[in-house]
Image (cartoon, rainbow, N blue to C red):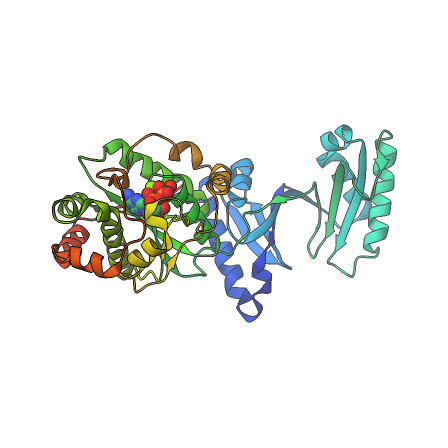
Amino acid sequence: MNEIILMKLGEVVLKGLNRRSFEDKLNSNIRRRLAHYGSFRVYSKQSTVYVEPQGDGCDLDGAYGACRQVFGAIAVTRALPCPKDKDAIFHCAQNYLDAELRAARTFKVETKRADKHFPMNSMEISQYVGGLLHDAYPHLKVDVHTPELCVHVEVREKAAYVHAPSQPGAGGLPIGMGGTAVSLLSGGIDSPVSSYMIAKRGVQLELVHFFSPPYTSQMALDKVKQLAKELAPWCGRMTLHIVPFTEIQEEIRRACPEDHFTLIMRRFMMRLAQGVAKRTGAKALVTGESLGQVASQTMDALTVSDEVCTLPVLRPVIGMDKQEIILISRKIGTFDTSILPYEDCCTVFTPRHPKTHPHLDEVHEFEKALDIEGLVEKALSGVERVTVSQ
Ligand code: ATP
Ligand code: MG
């Protein structure tokens, strides 16, 4: 029998009557992500997703890595199926985990018996297989509390499965179950992390990036495309909406006081993101703002940008320190790209003394000098869309 991948469902199991639709979504997400790696049969039973390669041309290493990035599973492992027979299970464990059994000094066997018709109970299977392994590897000592190697045996409906300890899965909920949101993706460290965090809660993302040529370069735009590509193994296929922002920035600079420049610019970003949300059916916006990190992220400043929003603004990193955000950014693989030194539209025309405690009535007054609707319409009509996949 061929090696397969087992994925343990996470929060999906708590979904009661909706559980079936969560499982179906998870399975179809897995199928789509694995398309690169060959042909796989994907189905779920008893809180476990089975990923079985069909034929020899499958890249199981690649598929395993991909499965660990699919939201909805809390643990992932490779496993070898064998006939449901106590000696077959022992031989399977010996052959499949030989290298691990040689390397470990202490071990135990842990059995789960989902098939209650199997003639031995879990304890008896563990003792039987453990005893034979102990004979075969006399250097091994049994340690039931903190073994270096735990040999897992699962006796299920169709077969028994042997595997080493699972690795953590991506957690969260299957993408698509939580609706769609528009995530504002800059080239920085925070917004890829905030995008990842909301996608993890089962949300399909539409990415929006504002770019301001010639003040921001093609390299800066390529960096954002690269970040989107790095998010795709987690977030699935997405569209990156590239919104021309130069004219809006030039207009604000021409007509508004310098200390309000960023605040008014951020209101435009929100209006434009909502424009994209309207076209795509998204029901929330996502930003990488963290309270107090910069002048435009004080509570007063957030009030000013939220005022133009009718959709909820999700800010998953709002209470996180930079170091905490960086940790996630390293974990998900976006950090090295995020720190490439290209400019963002936020860093051009930056005020020397940005207003940290703005007043809404002042902001309204300054905005009177701008053709808000015209500028928004024009920017939205110039949006370029790029499909991002793994
Ligand atoms: P980041 O690391 O995400 O760039 P930051 O601390 O640099 O965050 P700001 O530049 O003030 O923060 O931007 C705050 C948020 O606004 C970003 O997290 C992002 O969601 C959004 N944003 C900023 N610039 C852009 C842009 N050019 N395109 C799209 N969204 C942007
Ligand atoms: Mg930024």
Q: Nearer the viewer, residue 72 or 296?
A: 296
Q: Can residue 278 be seen in this view?
A: yes
Residue 184 seen by the camera: no
Q: Is residue 44 left or right of residue 320?
A: right
42 horizontally vs 119: left or right? left
In the shown orientation, is residue 110 left or right of residue 280?
right
x%, y% of residue 135? 88, 34
Q: Is residue 3 left or right of residue 258?
A: right
- Residue 101 in percent (x, y) is at 77, 32
The quarter of the picture where residue 390 lies is top left
Please give the name of the residue rendered at 20% of the width and 35% of the height, measured from the top-left corner. Answer: 215
In percent of width and height, residue 343 lies at 28, 34
Give whichever of 258, 105 is nearer the camera. 258
Q: Residue at horizontal 34%, vertical 56%?
A: 300
User: In the depicted view, which residue is nearer to us: 45 or 209?
Assistant: 209
Which quadrant: the N terminus? top right
Marks counted in the figure total 0
x, y (%) of residue 207? Answer: 33, 49
Residue at 31 percent across and 62 percent down: it is 281
Q: Which residue lies furthest to the bottom in this view?
A: 17
Q: In which quarter of the image is residue 230?
A: top left
Above or below for 234 versus 173: above
Q: Quadrant of ligand 2?
A: top left
Up/down of 141 relative to 176, above or below: above
